[in-house]
Amino acid sequence: CKGINGLDKVVLREPRGSTAEVYLYGAHVTSWKNDHGEELLFVSSKAMFKPPKAIRGGIPVCFPQFGSHGSLEQHGFARNRFWSIDTDPPPFPTNSKSFIDLILKPSEEDVQKWPHSYEFRLRVALGTGGDLMLTSRIRNTNADGKPFTFTFAYHTYFSVSDISEVRVEGLETLDYLDNLQNKERSTEQGDALTFESEVDKTYLGTPTKIAILDHEKKRTFVLRKDGLPDAVVWNPWDKKAKTMADFGDDEYKHMLCVEAAVVGKPITLKPGEEWKGRLELSAVPSSYCSGQ
Ligand code: TA6
């Protein structure tokens, strides 16, 4: 169906009522609702659904690079391109009944900037309990025998009731690169993360499972990931938020990015090789009380 500005959108619906909305622009998930119809992802009220600007919120897919270096646009071009529905995907097991397979292949323009041939297949699926599952399969199809190297992230914006009452568990004691301090490497404290100012950290070698606890909503987001060893945690806070035209001044209070990623050790694929990166999100009731 058509979404905002006439962009192609797919709506996934699971029998119990949970839904996901996926734009074919950037293969961008912009909504994930539980079976009570509550929106679990953050999308800015000022988000622009106008290619080639990335949509501010939801789950932008960052490929072939996370971050801004070299000639590629920040976080790579995949989130700024039109994808197609993959009508004939290679067999890929799933127990979901509601999923969509999307595919991105390089455009002439992109080959100029990143001289490689690849097939990037993304499957977005709703599980029976309303879980949201994203699986990326990236294959090197270079005919010239050349390998290629990339970094990657699912840049997920979670909707939270009040950032000052959110805790993240699973990243304590890990090493991280502080992107606000010129990627200086440090080690995280021994307790769950809490938030009282701008944060932009790339945690390295993270566990499969990370939890985001929302006090007011008594809700815990659980991220389970495979093939994605790192996690980026970002909140722009007030000053940075004011510099972003597609972000409301106070919206930082109601979002947190926890991004399953491959940043620390880029992936290199030889022709014919395929990388898989899988992220499973669930939102479960939690009896968490802040400060405990
Ligand atoms: O997720 C961390 C980050 O790299 C931040 O440094 C900030 O730039 C954010 O991504 C948003 O990037 P974008 O290109 O979507 O504005």
Image: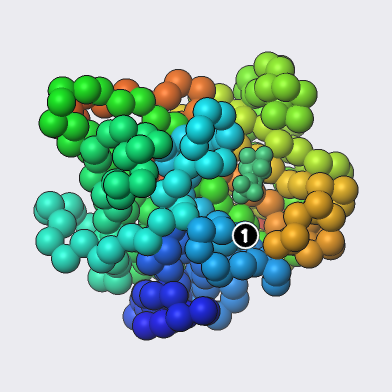
Residue 238, position in %: x, y?
A: 86, 52
Q: Residue at x 45, y 21 (%)?
A: 265
Decide: is 53 above or below 18. above
Marker count (numbered): 1
On screen, residue 275 versus residue 71, left or right, reads: left
Residue shown at the point (16%, 66%) measured from the top left? 87
Hey, which quadrant is residue 1 in on the image? Answer: bottom left
Q: From the viewer's perspective, tell me whether residue 272 is left or right of residue 32.
A: left
Q: Residue 243: where, in percent of width, then height?
A: 81, 52
Element on which disc 1 rests: loop
Q: Is residue 94 above or below residue 14?
A: above
Residue 155 appears at what percent x and percent y? 54, 48
Task: Say which quadrant the C terminus sits in.
Answer: top right
Label 1 Cα neighbours within 10 Å, binned few <14 / some 14-19 / many ≥20: many
Write the residue at 55% across / 52% down.
156
Q: Nearer the viewer, residue 2 or 93?
A: 2
**Could one spot residue 228 in this view of the protein?**
no
As rendered, which of 196 and 105 lies closer to the eye? 105
Q: 153 or 167: which is nearer to us?
A: 153
Question: Is any part of residue 114 visible from this angle?
Answer: yes
Residue 23 lies, with reference to residue 16, above or below; the image says: above
Tell me which amino acid carries mark 1.
Arg
Tell me: is circle 1 under 8 Å from ligand 1.
yes
Instruction: Point out residue 169 in the picture as x, y percentages from the top left corner.
Output: 65, 39
Which residue is under mark 1? Answer: 56
Ligand 1, seen in the image, is in the quarter at top right
Q: Residue at x 24, y 38 (%)?
A: 117
Scheme of colours in the image: rainbow
- Would you place residue 111 above or below residue 290 in this image? above
Left or right of 23 on screen, residue 142: left
